[in-house]
């Protein structure tokens, strides 16, 4: 299963995202907020259901502004990350993942891509396609689940 993970598009859908989706047999798209309306536009553009959570720009300031989805023998926590204060580090997010029995976390908010594993938890931030920060380039992440393995790649379109 191939998953395209995007975040922090802020009202702009990059044509490269649509092209990559069509050329690479993507099974699902996950959007991590800022702006969730972009998730709906992506859904129309690629003719596939997009799973999304809202971010701070979307007005989501609830401790319950996240989703947990089961996928390929994993439990994945989807969150924008602002409520878990990810700009200050991943510790709060790490404990939230553990409390929800999640072994993978997709989050955004920092506009900088990162893939890092702490103990049994894999953290994935796709960065931002339209407003990258910290010297990073526009990006999203491809996650592939195959034979009980998870592979990830930051894509710079």
Image: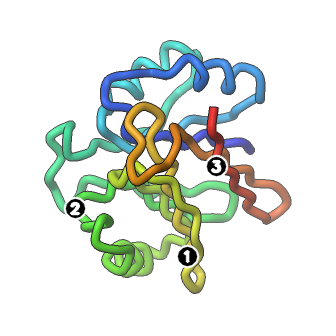
Up-down relation of residue 20 to residue 34 (above or below): above
In this picture, residue 89 sits left or right of residue 75: left
Q: Quadrant of the C terminus?
A: top right
User: In whole angstroms, how far apart are the C-alphas of marks 2 and 3?
Assistant: 24 Å
Which percent across, then down, holds residue 88?
Answer: 28, 72
Q: Residue at (51%, 49%) from the top-left corner? A: 126
Which residue is rendered at x = 62% and y = 55% of the image? 71
| x then y, percent, for residue 79 | 36, 55
Q: Which residue is mark 1?
A: 121
> Against 16, is 9 above or below?
below
Question: Dot 3: few (<14), some (14–19), or many (≥20) neighbours within 10 Å?
Answer: some
Q: Which residue is mark 3?
A: 154
Circles 3 and 1, Cβ within 8 Å, touching? The answer is: no
Give the quarter of the figure containing the N terminus.
Answer: top right
Give the image location of residue 123, x and y in percent: 52, 66
Q: Nearer the viewer, mark 3 or mark 1?
A: 3
Q: Quadrant of residue 13?
A: top left
Q: Mark 2, mark 3: which one is toward the viewer?
A: 3
Q: Earlier in the sequence, mark 2 or mark 3?
A: 2
């Amino acid at each position: 299963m191939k998953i395209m993970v995007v975040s922090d598009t802020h009202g702009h859908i990059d044509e490269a995202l649509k092209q990559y989706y069509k050329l690479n047999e993507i099974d699902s798209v996950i959007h991590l907020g800022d702006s969730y309306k972009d998730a709906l536009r992506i859904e129309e553009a690629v003719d596939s259901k997009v799973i999304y959570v809202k971010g701070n720009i979307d007005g989501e300031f609830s401790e319950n502004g996240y989703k947990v989805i089961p996928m390929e023998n994993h439990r994945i926590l989807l969150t924008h990350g602002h409520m878990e204060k990810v700009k200050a580090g991943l510790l709060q997010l790490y404990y939230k993942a553990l409390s929800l029995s999640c072994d993978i976390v997709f989050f955004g908010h920092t506009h900088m891509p990162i893939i890092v594993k702490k103990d049994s938890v894999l953290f994935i931030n796709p960065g931002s396609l339209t407003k990258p920060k910290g010297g990073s380039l526009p990006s999203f992440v491809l996650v592939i689940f195959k034979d009980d393995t998870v592979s990830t790649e930051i894509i710079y379109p």
